[in-house]
Image (tube, grey):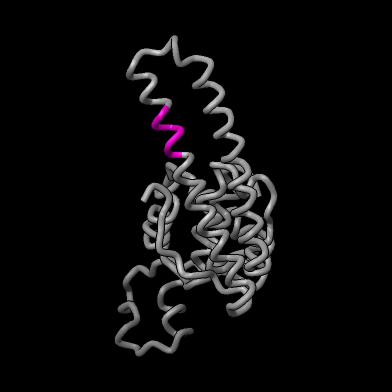
Amino acid sequence: MGGRPAVLELAVLGLLHDAPMHGYELRKRLNTVLGTFRAFSYGSLYPCLKDLLRRGLIAEDTDAAAAAGQGEPRAARPLAGRRSKIVYRITAAGKERLQELLAEAGPAAWEDDGFGIRFAFFGQTRADVRLRILEGRRSRLEERLEHFRAALTRTRERLDGYTLELHRHGLESVEREVRWLNELIGKERAQADDGPEGQPPEIRSEPGG
């Protein structure tokens, strides 16, 4: 998976897999998920929804139809004459596409632009795929650490104090994430040996925490 549209596609399908949502609710949930890792433009959501509808990966219902389909009492449905809101739900084809996206574990899944979103949906991801992504992310960051250290060694004498502190801060941030990844990888491997198949391990730490 790579690129901004694919990241948003994964997030929308992943959220709708949990439950149908109005557009406004979906926007709020996306902001919570995507906003943690990257800037999210609301202007990109509706073109994405339109594309997913065109491809048959999601479908539209009115809130009245959704309520009826879920067996809610009549009192919970919109009053007659009131404008119904659109509810988006994932289709069978959308669920298949979501599983395809979640199964991808190539470089795009562990780069900065994609890793955070993939991690947000680790609960829906197979254990072996989670482990490959975590190990790929760690490898990428270890390469970055080598670059940081080499650059700091070459330029230390030419940097002023503030720029030097900025470099050190970047180095410490990457080192902290590598330690976090090491802990997660250890838990994933232990879970593979001892725990239920495919279930994510208990997570107690966060990068930067």
Residue 2 falls in which quadrant of the image?
A: top right
Location of residue 96 by image quarter: bottom right
Q: Which residues are magenta?
A: 168-173
Residue 49 visible, this angle: no
Q: Position of residue 73 (x, y in %)?
A: 35, 90
Residue 23: x and y, percent?
Answer: 42, 60
Counting from the top left corner in percent of width and height, residue 171 is at: 46, 33
Look at 39% across and 20% down and name the residue there: 164
In the depicted structure, whether residue 40 falls above or below residue 131: above
User: As drawn, is 183 to the left or to the right of 83?
Assistant: right
Q: Return the residue nearer the eye: 182 or 36.
A: 182
Q: Main secondary structure of the magenta part?
A: helix
Left or right of 5 on screen, residue 20 = left
Foreground of the two, 165 or 35 = 165
Q: Residue at x 30, y 87 (%)?
A: 75
Is residue 150 something that shows in the picture? yes
Residue 168, compared with residue 70, is above or below; it is above
**Which residue is at a point 44% across and 68% down the rendered structure image?**
21
Q: Is residue 167 above or below residue 193?
A: above
The x and y percentages for residue 182 are 54, 54
The residue lying toward the viewer, choosing from 189 and 67, is: 189
- Between 180 and 21, the residue placed more toward the observer is 180
